[in-house]
Image (spheres, rainbow, N blue to C red):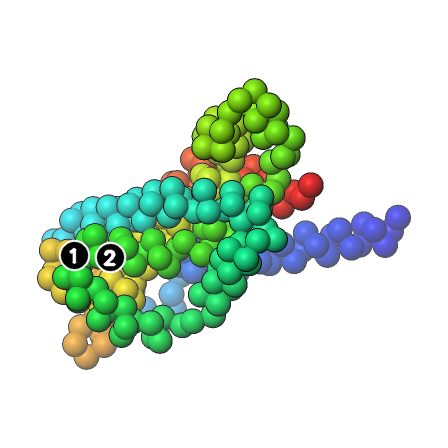
């Protein structure tokens, strides 16, 4: 009994340490965003600003088009998440229900191999393909890249969710005369709602925070996304305008936090559903 309590206490301590580790950068970012320039240059920084100010936020909006960049990021992230989920759902259904077929095995191999390639190796051929398609410096081209990049992970997640749905329900629908498409839309898809929401959220957050593809593929300032615009607060000599940069970065993290907070129950349900096996 005492050993069990000690082990549980150790688990809670490890979890608390992990939460502190995750929260430290964000809390420091918030603190920096509200500090005046005098405190930012202090040799003895503090967690809580002595004289909190909103001047960093006003300066950030005055120096860079944050709202327009946030709109570009929102369009790219929503478009990529929606298309990735629409494509991954029927593909995951086929892989889960026909996992022994050559097509399902090939798709599984593609998922594993695609995650092993670093971005640097694919950016040049990807740039050439988009150039031939005349999609460089365009939002459709960026969304296409985000969909291709998010699709393997979305597919991998949804396969687990589909396998958690009892096949007997689909068999009952088939007995009632429903075809494959009708069964997928009317029976399987509603049960996959938590998993679809969780998958779409991960695709959205990945696209919202993505920097490398947006930096290479988007050239004109009016089409740049928020992560790229944040680099404009760093001067040519590498000196960062720390206050406005922290304020803009804090605003850039808020959408992800709000979405996670609003959809927390569905995300948790989707995770648990994907972890269950028949």
- Residue annotated with mark 1: 138
Q: Nearer the viewer, residue 267 or 153?
A: 153
- Residue annotated with mark 2: 142
Q: Nearer the viewer, residue 109 or 259?
A: 109
Residue contact at pointers 2 and 1, CB within 8 angstroms = yes
Secondary structure at numbered mark 1: loop
Residue at 57% from the left image edge and 53% from the top image edge: 101
Residue lying at the far top in this picture: please name it: 176
Crowd tier of the residue under label 2, counting other residues whose Cα lies within 10 Å: few below 14, some 14–19, many 20 or above: many
Residue at 28% from the left image edge and 64% from the top image edge: 213
| One can see residue 72 in this view | yes
Secondary structure at numbered mark 2: helix
- How far from the left and from the top, in percent, is residue 24? 47, 59
Relative to 43, say whether 199 is above or below: above
- How far from the left and from the top, in percent, is residue 220? 11, 62
Instruction: Specify the label residue 272 is tagged with.
Output: none
Count up the numbered dots: 2
Crowd tier of the residue under label 1, counting other residues whose Cα lies within 10 Å: few below 14, some 14–19, many 20 or above: some
Q: Nearer the viewer, residue 20 or 226?
A: 226
Q: Which of 203 and 54 is in front in this view?
A: 203
- How far from the left and from the top, in percent, is residue 3? 85, 54
Residue at 54% from the left image edge and 57% from the top image edge: 102
């Amino acid at each position: 009994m005492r050993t069990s309590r000690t082990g549980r206490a150790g688990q809670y301590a490890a979890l608390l340490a992990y939460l502190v580790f995750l929260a430290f950068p964000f809390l420091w970012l918030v603190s920096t965003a509200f500090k005046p320039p005098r405190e930012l240059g202090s040799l003895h920084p503090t967690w809580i600003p002595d004289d909190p100010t909103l001047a960093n936020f006003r300066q950030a909006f005055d120096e860079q088009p944050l709202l327009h960049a946030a709109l570009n990021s929102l369009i790219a992230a929503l478009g990529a998440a929606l298309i990735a989920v629409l494509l991954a759902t029927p593909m995951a259904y086929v892989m889960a229900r026909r996992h022994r077929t050559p097509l399902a095995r090939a798709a599984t191999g593609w998922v594993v191999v695609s995650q092993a390639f670093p971005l640097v190796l694919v950016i040049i051929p990807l740039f050439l393909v988009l150039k031939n398609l005349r999609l460089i410096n365009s939002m459709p081209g960026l969304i296409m890249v985000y969909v291709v990049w998010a699709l393997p992970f979305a597919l991998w997640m949804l396969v687990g969710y589909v396998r958690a749905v009892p096949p007997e329900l689909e068999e009952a629908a088939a007995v009632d005369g429903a075809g494959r498409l009708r069964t997928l839309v009317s029976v399987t898809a509603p049960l996959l709602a938590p998993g679809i929401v969780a998958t779409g959220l991960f695709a959205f957050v990945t696209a919202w925070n993505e920097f490398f593809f947006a930096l290479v593929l988007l050239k004109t300032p009016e089409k740049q996304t928020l992560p790229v615009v944040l680099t404009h607060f760093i001067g040519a000599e590498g000196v960062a305008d720390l206050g406005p940069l922290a304020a803009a970065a804090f605003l850039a993290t808020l959408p992800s936090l709000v979405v996670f907070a609003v959809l927390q129950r569905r995300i948790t349900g989707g995770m648990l559903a994907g972890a269950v096996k028949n």
